[in-house]
Amino acid sequence: MAQCAKRRPRPLVWVVVALLAVATALVLPACRGQTAGPSDIQMTMQVAPSPAAVGPAEITLALRGADGSPVLGATVDVEGTMNHAGMVPVRVRTEPLGEGRYATRDFHFTMAGDWIIIVQAALADGRKVERTFELKGVAGEGMGKPADPAGQMQH
Ligand SMILES: [Cu+2]
């Protein structure tokens, strides 16, 4: 007598699916900036920790040419700002990590809310590239409390 084999979910499959989901979640925070300057330069940004919160953060930019080759020898400056009056921008220079990647060392998110990250890169060949990234919903210090207890920095 023929019996249908019972199809049970194989645990290993679900482990793989879960790992892929985690990997996707880790990759997703990277976003592509708006274009200004040479369009053959691709720039992607990653912010750690993610999700971003008030306090120290590391912003990493990856610069690649049209053929995917890393852009070496660039001078990359990062300005973090917000779209409201009285905002004091946070400006830092990055350090090269190699392979076309550049990271900030002393960047701080000073306020909670929606940030705009403006990246200016001076390429080794003299060209300048600017990209603007939106980073929405930077959390306040300590589980969503306002960044400043006095409330002056809230918006
Ligand atoms: Cu602000």
Image: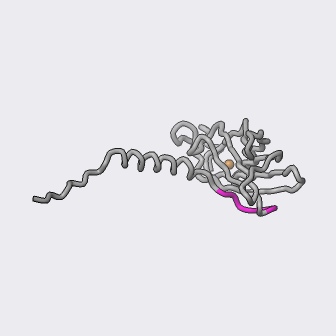
Up-down: is 125 above or below 111? below
- 50 or 149: nearer the eye? 50
Instruction: Classify residue 64 as left or right of residue 22.
Output: right
Residue 27 at what x, y percent from top left?
A: 57, 50
Horizontal and vertical percent position of residue 79: 76, 48
User: Residue 104 falls in which quadrant of the image?
Assistant: top right
When asked about the image quadrant of residue 147, the answer is top right
Q: Residue at x 87, y 49 (%)?
A: 124
Magenta span contains residue 53:
no
Residue 70 relative to residue 2: left or right:
right
Image height of 40 relative to 9, above or below:
below
How far across and down, in percent of the image, does residue 10 sit? 31, 48
Magenta highlight range: 32-38
Please name whichever residue, 17 or 107, is drawn nearer the observer in this view of the structure.
17
Image quarter of the N terminus = bottom left
- Residue at 51% over, 47% down: 23
Task: Identify the residue at image location x=45%, y=45%.
Answer: 19
- Residue 65 or residue 86, whichever sits in front: 65
Residue at (76% x, 56% y) in the render: 65
Q: Residue furthest right?
A: 126
Can you give x and y, in whole percent of width and height, for residue 69 in the image?
A: 74, 53
Q: Residue furthest left?
A: 1
